[in-house]
Amino acid sequence: MSERLSPGAKFRKALINNKPLQVVGTINAYTAMMAQQNGHQAIYLSGGGVANASYGLPDLGMTSLNDVLADVSRITSACDLPLLVDIDTGWGGAFNIAKTIRDMEKAGAAAVHIEDQVAQKRCGHRPNKEIVSTEEMVDRIKAAVDARTDPDFFIMARTDAFAQEGLEKALERAKAYVAAGADGIFAEAVKTEEHYRAFSEALDVPILANMTEFGQTELWTREQLGEWGAGIILYPLSAFRAMNKAAEAVYRALLEDGHQRNVIDTMQTRMELYDYLGYHDYEQKLDALFAEGKNK
Ligand SMILES: C[C@](O)(C(=O)O)[C@H](CC(=O)O)C(=O)O
Ligand SMILES: [Mg+2]
């Protein structure tokens, strides 16, 4: 019999089985299926990604809990890999954060990360971020931890403190966040081997390394980050950025060339598209149903 694990338990199992665990951003249900069928063990829904892709907005805290939940539900309906969700600052005070956690669990998320920026948040790799006090962030974490119903639901604290306060203060905060119940630490926009090692040596929960492109951090390899103690490596928007560039080339070619022949090689074929969807199984069932109907 196959094990029936909760999403949170699946995420924890993936963490044990993969050291470090690569977690890939999937911007929608279809790319989640692609990630799974290509062998990934865990997926991510980016807050910036929801804002950009689903709403055409910048990553500045303008999307709501319900906006993100809609995308979470679409993804978890189509793919049973454990999903880590970016819940920004949790969308309000303690009651709101508790509701966020309950709704995320109900929507099938396995894990979330909540950050210590002010509500008027920015992308972690942009300048002039403001953060709340350690006490306020500790309250956020306690509200989140108290609200979960599945003890395996994974609650990660993200600290954006490094940019403003430096390594020592960021480490102090991370320790306080773990003491408050955080299951993992997202060390945002730290840069070097020394920084990653400092986080992983100071804490005995998994440390997330964010390998987002075109930001503050070099694109370190899985081997390097693993050696430096990272438990999770995040690629939040990598596939999304590649998809966008491919789409741009197609839109331009259609106008410039008047046809798509020069970009056809960059496209997924109809057959490839269908394979990920299991299209042919659906079609066979449909054929069988039609045949049954005719024989009646
Ligand atoms: C991880 C992140 O929070 C996201 O929303 O995907 C972003 C990624 C990015 O903007 O590159 C962040 O690091 O703030
Ligand atoms: Mg984000």
Image: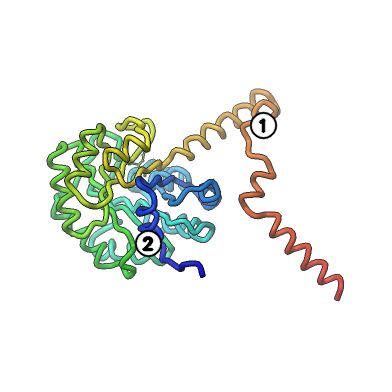
Residue with the most extreme bottom position: 296
Image side of residue 262 versus residue 166, left or right: right
Q: Position of residue 261 (x, y in %)?
A: 70, 28
At 21% from the left and 60% from the top, the residue drawn is 181
- Give the quadrant of residue 153: bottom left
Which quadrant of the structure image shows residue 65?
A: bottom left
Using the rendered image of the protein, determine whether residue 100 is visible from the camera's viewpoint. no
- Among all residues in the image, which is located at the extreme top? 256
Ligand 1 shows up in the quarter that is top left
What SS does tag 1 mark?
helix
Residue pointed to by mark 1: 264
Residue 97 position within the rendered picture, expressed as x and y whole percent measured from the top left: 28, 61
Res. 155 mark? none
Q: Position of residue 203 (x, y in %)?
A: 19, 49
Amino acid type shown at disc 1 = Ile
For numbered disc 2, what is the local secondary structure? helix
C-alpha gap between disc 2 and disc 1: 40 Å
Q: Nearer the viewer, residue 51 or 10?
A: 10
Q: Is residue 145 visible to us here?
A: yes
Q: Which quadrant of the figure contains the C terminus?
A: bottom right
Mark 2 and mark 1 lie on one chain; the one further toward the N terminus is 2
Task: Name the residue carrying label 2.
Answer: 8
The three-letter code of the residue at mark 2 reads: Gly
**Residue placed at 30% from the left, 36% from the top?**
125
Q: Is residue 140 above or below residue 35?
A: below
- For marks 2 and 1, give the one nearer the viewer: 2
Q: Is residue 75 above or below residue 210?
A: below
Residue at coordinates 39% horizontally, 53% vertically from top-left? 17
Q: Position of residue 89 (x, y in %)?
A: 28, 52
